[in-house]
Each structure stands twice: as C-alpha cells, then as structure tokens.
C-alpha cells in the first residue's frame, strides 16, 4: 500500500512483516603462503632472511644563515660629500679703486737723535755724533738739550757718552735748568755725583731762583747726604 496523505499514519501498515535472518559468516581459513610460486626457480628461499625495519630519527643539518648576524654588523656612517657644481658662476666686476701712495714722513736729525737718547741707543748716538749730524748744544722742541734728555732717561752710560763727545755739563734749557737740576729733581744720585765730579755747579739757579739741592726729595737719602753742608 502506498502512503497516502488521506489516511492517518496509524493506519499505515507494511504489506508484509520483515523477518531478518541472522548472518553467519563462514570460518576463514588462511592458506599457507609459499614464496616458491612467486619467485624464479633460480632463487633459493633459504637465502632470503627478512629483517625488521628500524626507523632512525631524522636529524636535520645545522642551518647556517648566509647573512651576517646583527650583533657583528657595524654600521658605518659616511658623511655626504658636498656636490660641487662645475657650472661657472657669473663673475662680478669689482670696481677698481686707485690708492694713492702715502706720503713719506721725514723727521729731522734732531728729532731722530732725541728719540735715540730717550731709548738709550748708544750705538746709533755714536754714529750721529761721528757723522756730525747734530749739535749737542741744540735746544730741541721740548726746550731741552741732548744732555738734559739723557739725564731724564736715567741712563748714566748715555750721559757719559754725550760728555765724551763734548756735551757741556753747564748746559741750560729754556728755564735755565742745568743737567744737575734734572738729576736732583728726578732722583738720580749716581748721575748727580758724576756731574759734580766733572765740575757741575751746585749753586746754579734756574729762573725760579732754585738751586739743584732745593729740588731734592727728602725721601731720597742718597741725594740728601750728597748735598749736605761741607760735602759739595
């Protein structure tokens, strides 16, 4: 009977009852296996000894990387070079300026000689004196003669050199100061003693009526002792 939607399910019955039968498998008997039927006649079964296969552990070869490890890599920084262009730069025309040579300044022999005395240039002083380029009694623009300048420099050797070439120890300047006045006022006892030994006058007065002893500083004990009563 075919299934019909018109009939309820409870009315559906099979046409025949199904009775399953028990399945009984036949006993399986293995046959003896003989290799002789599969091997050629020249092969002897006695020579064949089956061996048990023992698998070995697979050890992969050590991997050596082709690149350098980062620990041994040294980073080298190269400073970029400045690019120099071969292109010619336009040249700027520099205006030419004509510089006139400075006029040479010529000093008179008296000025040069006076400078030599102030710096104690004994050799140059001797050259001037031997060449007779100056006169020792000439009053310089400073108002003093050569011997006065030598005394004020405190150079005893220069004083002796000028005296050697004829300088007068009694020479007066514009204010009637003698070289001995200069030595006493500026505190040079050695020069004063040398001038006195040559006959310099201790009684000479300048325009203010002052004698050399009147210009001595009381703290200069050597000059005070030199001009004590009875010593000069």
Image: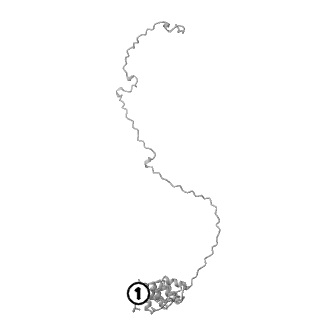
Q: Residues within 10 Å of mark 1 (few under 14, many from 20)?
A: some
Total residue callouts? 1
**x 43%, y 91%: residue:** 196
Front residue of 29 and 133:
133
In the drawing, does residue 139 fall left or right of residue 28? Answer: right
Residue 84 picture location, percent across and down: 58, 58
State whether residue 40 is above or below residue 118: above
Residue 217 picture location, percent across and down: 43, 84
**x 48%, y 85%: residue:** 150
Q: Quadrant of residue 49?
A: top left
Quarter of the C terminus within the rendering? bottom left
Residue 30 picture location, percent across and down: 37, 18
Front residue of 105 and 192:
192
The residue tagged 1 is 224
Residue 53 picture location, percent across and down: 37, 30
SS class, disc 1: helix
Q: Quadrant of residue 83?
A: bottom right
Looking at the image, what colour scheme do you see?
A: one colour
Front residue of 126 and 158:
158
């Amino acid at each position: 009977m075919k299934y019909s939607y018109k009939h309820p399910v409870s009315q559906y019955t099979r046409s025949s009852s199904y009775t399953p039968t028990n399945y009984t498998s036949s006993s399986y008997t293995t046959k003896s296996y003989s290799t002789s039927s599969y091997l050629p006649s020249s092969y002897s079964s006695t020579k064949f000894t089956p061996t048990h296969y023992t698998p070995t552990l697979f050890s992969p070869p050590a991997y050596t990387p082709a690149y350098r490890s980062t620990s041994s890599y040294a980073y080298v920084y190269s400073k970029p070079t400045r690019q120099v262009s071969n292109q010619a730069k336009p040249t700027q025309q520099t205006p030419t300026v004509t510089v006139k040579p400075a006029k040479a300044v010529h000093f008179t022999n008296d000025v040069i000689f006076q400078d030599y005395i102030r710096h104690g240039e004994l050799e140059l002083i001797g050259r001037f004196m031997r060449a007779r380029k100056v006169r020792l009694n000439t009053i310089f623009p400073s108002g003093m003669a050569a011997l006065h300048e030598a005394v004020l420099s405190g150079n005893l050797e220069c004083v002796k050199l000028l005296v050697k070439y004829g300088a007068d120890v009694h020479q007066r300047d514009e204010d009637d100061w003698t070289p001995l006045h200069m030595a006493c006022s500026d505190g040079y006892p050695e020069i004063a003693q040398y001038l006195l030994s040559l006959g310099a006058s201790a009684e000479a007065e300048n325009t203010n009526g002052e004698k050399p002893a009147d210009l001595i500083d009381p703290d200069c004990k050597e000059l005070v002792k030199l001009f004590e009563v009875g010593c000069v």
